Image (cartoon, grey):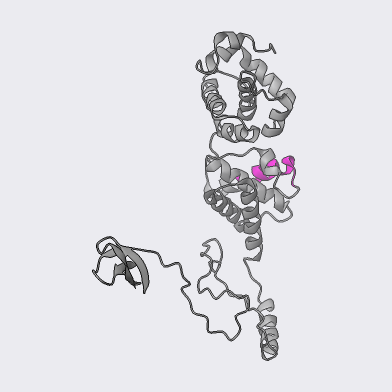
Amino acid sequence: MGDAFCSDCKKHTEVVFDHSAGDTVCSECGLVLESHSIDETSEWRTFANESGDNDPVRVGGPSNPLLTDGGLSTVISRPNGASGDFLSSSLGRWQNRGSNPDRSLILAFKTIATMSDRLGLVATIKDRANEIYKKVEDQKSSRGRNQDALLAACLYIACRQEDKPRTVKEICSVANGATKKEIGRAKEYIVKQLELEMGQSVEMGTIHAGDFMRRFCSNLGMNNQAVKAAQEAVQKSEEIDIRRSPISIAAAVIYIITQLSDDKKPLRDISLATGVAEGTIRNSYKDLYPHVSRIIPSWYAKEEELRNLCSP
């Protein structure tokens, strides 16, 4: 029972909660004041003598089809009290004797999850990286290789396949000490192993400069108008035959857009935000400079402003 305002009775009346239907009903006129309400109280009852800090939830984590037991194995904890010491130690010894075949996989999945969280990646990319690592691990040919580089390479490939690519430098920043060279070698090894298993080439997805643009602009704190202009410029730059990597083109476009705005960014800041060397940005800017009138949106900069750009 509770108290609420009834629009039919025009006054506060006692209400009845129907937990099975999720309805709140006026006790005087029978009007349903609220329907399909969510009961946010606990779904369990505690019968333990000691409350402690234990959480008595009845549910566990989701099952993982990549693990032998689905990730639903039982771990025996040590209970409190003198009577439980012998039982706990006895069962604990038997538990430790049994080897978990998925122990290395569980540790690898935890490492991938940590790297994904640090990069702000969605769960689908993390799951794809787990699948890739499981396939490589099942072939039993990765022993002796740098484990951190393998896990980072799996994440890099997963990002490519999910059309959310990250640069090797970004992956390297969360790879627990693995170098770009080691991650590159691990990536080639994984692709080769997957091709042997599948019997066909591995689809990695095409990298476009626009894939990095919004993230790079966000790192530099650019306003929405500048970000929109940079995205349009990058799309138009794909129509021009420029023999540069997509990341270098994205960095050069950002440099041009910032030079045309009131909030100019120094080349060093752009290099830090994009992970592209200053010399590479200058060379890419040199290649884009003859085409600025084609790629820069007319609503963002006039012809006179484009002519005032510094010559490379």
Q: Position of residue 12 (x, y in %)?
A: 33, 66
The quadrant of the rendering that contains the C terminus is top right
Q: Position of residue 134 (x, y in %)?
A: 59, 56
Residue 146: x and y in percent read 73, 51
Q: What secondary structure prevails in the magenta region?
A: helix
Is residue 190 at all visible to an observer of this figure?
no
Name the residue: 53% across, 18% down.
300
Judge by depth and name the residue closer to the eye, 292 or 45.
45
Image quadrant occupied by the N terminus: bottom left
Please provide the residue range marked out in magenta.
178-191
Count of residue discs:
0
Q: Is residue 293 left or right of residue 169?
A: left
Please tell me which residue is depicted at 57% across the width and 18% down the height of the picture: 241
- Of residues 181 and 299, the one nearer the viewer is 299
Asked which quadrant contains residue 6, the reply is bottom left
Q: Is residue 29 left or right of residue 236?
A: left
Is residue 206 visible in the rendered structure shown here? Answer: yes
In the current view of this chain or complex, which residue is farthest to the bottom? 83
* Image point (71%, 51%), residue name: 148
Nearest the viewer among 294 and 310 is 310
Q: Where 94 sits versus 119, above or below?
A: below
